[in-house]
Image: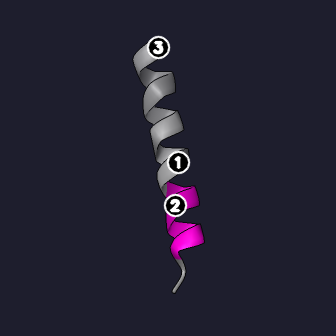
């Protein structure tokens, strides 16, 4: 049960996608 790591990784990916979209 390692949902914390998965969630953190997903949040990081979303942040990167948002930054690219804003750029």
* Residue at screen point 52% across, 73% down: 3
From the image, state whether disc 3 or disc 1 is nearer to you: 1
Which residue matches tag 2? 7
Name the residue rendered at 52%, 61% in the picture. Answer: 7
Q: Which residue is mark 1?
A: 11
Specify the color scheme: one colour
Instruction: Please tell me whether residue 4 is drawn above or below residue 22 in the rendered image.
Output: below
What is the CA distance from the residue labelled 3 to the residue labelled 1? 16 Å
Mark 1, other Cα within 10 Å: few <14 / some 14–19 / many ≥20: few
In the rendered image of this protein, does residue 22 appear above or below residue 15?
Answer: above
Residue shown at 54% from the left, 80% from the top = 2
> For the magenta stretch, what is the residue range?
3-9
User: Does 12 appear in magenta?
Assistant: no
User: Residue 14, relative to residue 3: is it above or below?
Assistant: above
Checking the image for residue 23, the label placed there is: none
- Label 2 – label 1 distance at C-alpha: 6 Å
Q: Residue furthest bottom?
A: 1
Q: Earlier in the sequence, mark 3 or mark 2?
A: 2
Q: Are marks 3 and 2 in contact (CB under 8 Å)?
A: no
Q: Which residue is mark 3?
A: 22
> Callout 3: few (<14), some (14-19), or many (20+) C-alpha neighbours within 10 Å?
few
Precedes in sequence: disc 3 or disc 1: 1
Q: Position of residue 16 (x, y in %)?
A: 50, 35
Estimate the x, y position of residue 23 in percent, counting from the top left: 47, 13
At 47% from the left and 54% from the top, the residue drawn is 10
Question: Is 14 rendered above or below residue 2?
Answer: above
Q: Is residue 12 left or right of residue 10?
A: right
Mark 2, other Cα within 10 Å: few <14 / some 14–19 / many ≥20: few
- The answer to whether mark 3 and mark 1 are in CB contact below 8 A is no
Main secondary-structure element of the magenta-colored stretch: helix
Q: Answer whether labels 2 and 1 touch (C-beta < 8 Å).
A: yes
């Amino acid at each position: 049960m390692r949902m914390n790591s998965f969630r953190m990784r997903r949040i990081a990916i979303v942040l990167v996608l948002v930054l690219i979209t804003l750029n």
